[in-house]
Every structure is written in structure tokens, then in C-alpha cells.
Amino acid sequence: MRRVIFEEGGSEQIWLEGKSAYADTNILLTVTSAAGERSAYISGSEVTELNAGQLVDPAPQAESNSSPRNYAGVKKAMTISGYTFAVL
């Protein structure tokens, strides 16, 4: 069995093929591209396009306050100490 999930016309389409081994299987499919994000909820009998935020909480964004510039001094000190130990 083949079900079309997203169809934009032309050759751009996403489809799901096969049959689940379990009758109560549900799938949340999210596709992200430069054009944006699209989600579909796939149950045993239908495909519903929706906003994924309606069903799940987004993953927390990783925040880093340190920049590569902060580590430049540490890297330089480690390099100098490494060469110093190698010479001794």
C-alpha cells in the first residue's frame, strides 16, 4: 500500500509504502527544508497534515555562551606547554 504524504506537484512528493505490523501504529513525520517545516500525522487509516507544535514540545536549543575566542588563550597555553615538555 502506498500513501502520498506531501505532494507539491511535479516530481516533489513524499510517500509512505508498506503496512505496519501493528494495527495501532501512529507516525509523526516532520520534513524541514529551506522553504520551511511541514508535518503530517499518519494513523492506520488516514494522513493529516498539521503543525508539529500541536502534538510535541520542541527540543530545547543548545546555548553556548563561550566563543572560540575564549578558548584561544587556553589553546595557546596548552601548545606552548606541550612543546616545552617535548623539549625537556
Image (spheres, rainbow, N blue to C red):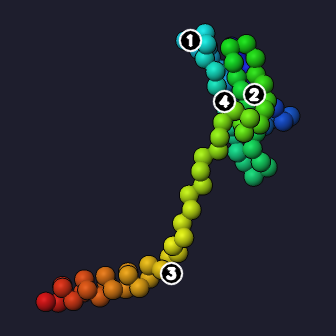
Nearest-to-viewer mark from 4 and 2:
4
Kindly check if marks 1 and 3 are in contact, taking CB atoms under 8 A apart as contact: no
Q: Residues within 10 Å of mark 4 (few under 14, many from 20)?
A: some
Q: CA distance from mark 4 to mark 2?
A: 11 Å
The residue under label 2 is 5
Residue type highlighted by circle 1: Tyr
The residue under label 4 is 28
Residue 33, how many percent across, how many down?
72, 48
In primary-sequence order, the first of circles 4 and 1 is: 1
Residue 77, how many percent across, how many down?
33, 86
* The quarter of the displayed image where residue 25 is located: top right
Label 1 sits on a secondary structure element that is loop
Residue type highlighted by circle 2: Ile
Nearest-to-viewer mark from 2 and 1:
1
- Is residue 13 visible to the viewer in this orientation of the structure? no
The residue under label 3 is 69
Residue type highlighted by circle 3: Arg
The quadrant the N terminus occupies is top right
Label 2 sits on a secondary structure element that is strand
Q: Is residue 66 left or right of residue 35?
A: left
- Is residue 86 visible to the viewer in this orientation of the structure? yes
Q: CA distance from mark 1 to mark 3?
A: 53 Å
The residue under label 1 is 22
Q: CA distance from mark 4 to mark 1?
A: 16 Å
In depth, the one of 50 and 9 nearer the eye is 50
Residue in the picture at 70% in, 23% down:
42
The quadrant the C terminus occupies is bottom left
Residue in the picture at 21% in, 89% down:
84
Kindly check if marks 2 and 1 are in contact, taking CB atoms under 8 A apart as contact: no
Residue 38, how many percent across, how many down?
76, 39
Q: CA distance from mark 2 to mark 3?
A: 45 Å
* The quarter of the displayed image where residue 37 is located: top right
